[in-house]
Image (cartoon, rainbow, N blue to C red):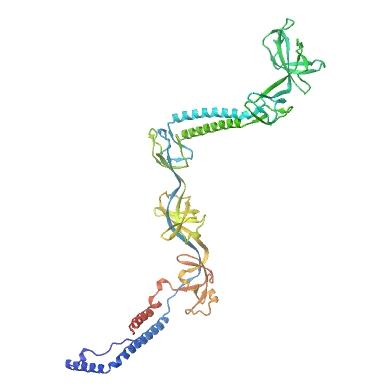
Amino acid sequence: MTWKKKKGGPAGQEPQAEAGAAAGAGLASLSKYKKYLKWAVPLVVVVVIVAAVAIYQSNKTQTAEVAPEYTQASVTRRTISQTLSTTGTLQAANSYTVRTLVEGEILSADFEEGDEVSAGQQLYQIENSDASTSVEQAQINLDQAQRNYDTIADYRYVRSPVAGTVYSLKVKVGDEVTSGQEVAVVQDASQMVLQLTFPSADAASFSVGQSAQITLDGTFEVLQGTITEVSGSDILSSGNVLVRNVTITTPNAGTLNTTQSATATVNGISSTNSATFNYKEQRTLTASTAGTVASIYVPEGGAVAKDGIVIELAGEDLEETIQNAYESLRSREISMRNAEETLANYTITAPISGTVIQKNYQAGETVESGKDMCIIYDMAYLEMTINVDELDINQISVGQDVSVTADSVDGVFNGKITRVSMVGKTDGGTTTYPVTVQVEEYGALRPGMNVNAEIVVEQAADAIAVPNAAIERGDVVLVTTASPSAANAIADMPAPEGYVYVQVETGVSDENYTEITSGLQEGDIIGYVSMSTFSYDDYGTSDMMVLGMIAPAQGGIG
């Protein structure tokens, strides 16, 4: 529709009087037809609306006739990565502030800032003479308490000091005994001892370990023996002969006893007398404390080892005595441990391996308890904590790669997620979850630097992809009719000349491209309207103008 300017104007006007008369005539005529005016106004409004709709339809026809300009592109393969970006502050793998728990003069501090130290390495030595004396005294007290407990705790047992056979038991289970009471006799019958006298002049040449021949009285059986003792003094025998006592020991095969007598010869020299055998060892066992016989470990005739238990005693008084001794021992052990820990505090060692970044005290200075001595950073790796929104946290997992960059350091550094917290923090209606990122090869990065972190949450490598603008509502894409995928055209969907619409399935997308998992193939030529060719008039300018014209008209009706 063409709008034309109406002809006529001031040059064609009549004299003013005539104009006034004409105006008067007009008013008279208007008054005459006043009753028709209330129907004329609505009629005019309707006419205007009809005209506007006609203009609207005309403009739509014109717009439809203007074909948009399409950008064509080949379908290719590329790697598409969907990422999350955030920021964080780097920290050392571990840091430790070394504090002293004691006070005194610093005797040594053999390290400097920047030095690498190992865990356990000595950093400071503080004068500790008083603490050393306390440890020594605590050790003495502990040793005494240990001996006392061992003695008292062993009171419940009656032990044999020698190996042998229980010759006799003088008590039975349930008997009450007193301290020092005889309870058993133990004999060592494996060897028998024979004490004889020899002429002094001859015995003077005898030596311990020398062989002797023993002749049993009555049977005249000869046994081999060994001299185990030679007296150093002479005695006068009943025949007024000077003699010396010689002790001879012989193994017992079980046939010898204390009623058997015998003589002996050494180097052909005979003893001056005959004597009976004695057991090599025979001990009478006594109770060390009062109590009740609770158990008998070895019966009469049974063998017992050296320090072996023969009888066990019990009783309330005995148990209380043992308990008191144990508690005294534990008290001494605790005192000893406390003294050692106090002494150890005077030698300050590195709690971790790392780099000394700050040293506050030097040798020769006096330090007070609780002061910070130095700070150590473990630089094995750097790490940072980033906060991930609740909408994205389920895309994050331990082991994912993180690209780390810093404004102050060139390059991209590889990090890995080492921890994803299950506990979130809510602030202003938004919940975020702490995620720990570790950077092992950190180059020139330093603790305290602010860095950017980019996490690849999903990636498609060597994927068929198209620009995001090429995917229209309903996941359809325009392809040229010559494209291989045009064979899969949507039959009932109109398309611009030279194109057809095909249905696609999408995958990973980034800011520019979207993965196509089905519907397209390499070699297809797609068409799409890029932002650079976007025209506002192509997308409803006339429509909006018409609606703008109609609205005031509708508002005026009534």
Residue 303 visible in the shown view = yes
Residue 309 visible in the shown view = no
Q: Is residue 246 left or right of residue 375?
A: right
How many numbered discs sit on the rendered protein?
Answer: 0
User: From this viewpoint, which residue is outermost toward the top?
Assistant: 240
Q: Residue at x 33, y 88 (%)?
A: 42
| Image-quadrant location for residue 429 | bottom left
Q: Is residue 2 above or below residue 284?
A: below
Give the image location of residue 455, x and y in percent.
Answer: 47, 58
Q: In the image shown, does 237 or 321 lie closer to the viewer?
A: 321
Quadrant where the C terminus is found in the figure: bottom left
Q: Is residue 386 left or right of residue 214?
A: left
User: From this viewpoint, which residue is outermost toward the right?
Assistant: 219
Give the image location of residue 448, x and y in percent.
Answer: 40, 50
Give the image location of residue 89, x and y in percent.
Answer: 42, 52
Q: Is residue 365 left or right of residue 167?
A: left
Q: Residue at x 71, y 23 (%)?
A: 187
Q: In the image shown, does 161 or 43 lie closer to the viewer?
A: 161
Q: Residue at x 70, y 24 (%)?
A: 186
Q: In the image shown, does 540 or 178 lie closer to the viewer?
A: 178
Q: Is residue 230 above or below residue 122?
A: above
Q: Is residue 166 left or right of residue 363?
A: right
Q: In the image shown, does 452 or 350 lie closer to the viewer?
A: 350
Quadrant where the N terminus is found in the figure: bottom left
Q: Is residue 546 above or below residue 350?
A: below
